[in-house]
Image: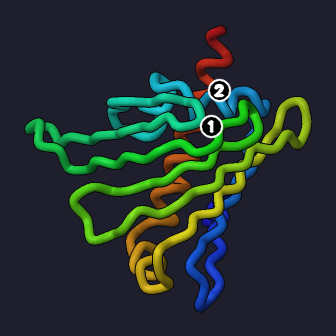
Amino acid sequence: MELKTKIHAEDGKQEILITREFDLPLELLFRAYTEPEIVEQWMGTKVLKMENKQHGSYQFETSNPQGDVVFRANGAIHEFVPNEKITRTFQMENTPFPVQIEFLEFEKLSDETSKITIQAIYKSVDFRDQHLRLPFAQGINMAHNRLEETVKKLEAGS
């Protein structure tokens, strides 16, 4: 089965390009990335902090059923333009991966469809390649599928 979220990683480069088209209006796609209640649903994580503004920051945390923290990530927001773009850092805590920078661009394709393009830049090609060896592509595709399902349910209920 082909993944709807596309990952492009050119050999020898420190970046990956992630693209996904959604059957969602642009405003709803943007909300899915910026409203803590929606982020928690599709990412399956708890949003501890989300300051959507220039010089803001965010923090996510996931615990197992026993209450042990199994994942924590944070970053600083450097640019925030509603329905257009977010530039932020991203760091997974308690891992060997250094901070990366992410450029998220949101694009209206039609009144009912939109697209996100994420350019993630890593400290080195080696760190990028290590990240790609994780079940990264399947994970982000599953998360994006949940994003679309979650937002469509919200839209239907409103």
Expressed as whole percent of the image width and height from the top left, the position of residue 120 reads: 58, 64
Expressed as whole percent of the image width and height from the top left, the position of residue 36 reads: 46, 26
Contact between marks 2 and 1 (CB within 8 A): the answer is yes
Q: Residue furthest bottom?
A: 12
- Answer with the quarter of the image where residue 59 lies: top left
Helix, strand or loop under label 2: helix
Residue at figure coordinates x 38%, y 30% from the top left: 49
Residue, disc 1: 148
Screen quadrant of the C terminus: top right
Residue at figure coordinates x 41%, y 62% from the top left: 99
What number is the disc on residue 152? 2
Q: How far apart are the two marked residues, 2 and 1, measured between alpha carbons?
A: 6 Å
- Answer with the quarter of the image where residue 62 lies: top left
Establish if 21 lies above or below 13. above
What amino acid type is highlighted by mark number 2? Lys
Establish if 127 lies above or below 60. below
Expressed as whole percent of the image width and height from the top left, the position of residue 22 reads: 73, 43
Residue at figure coordinates x 88%, y 43% from the top left: 109
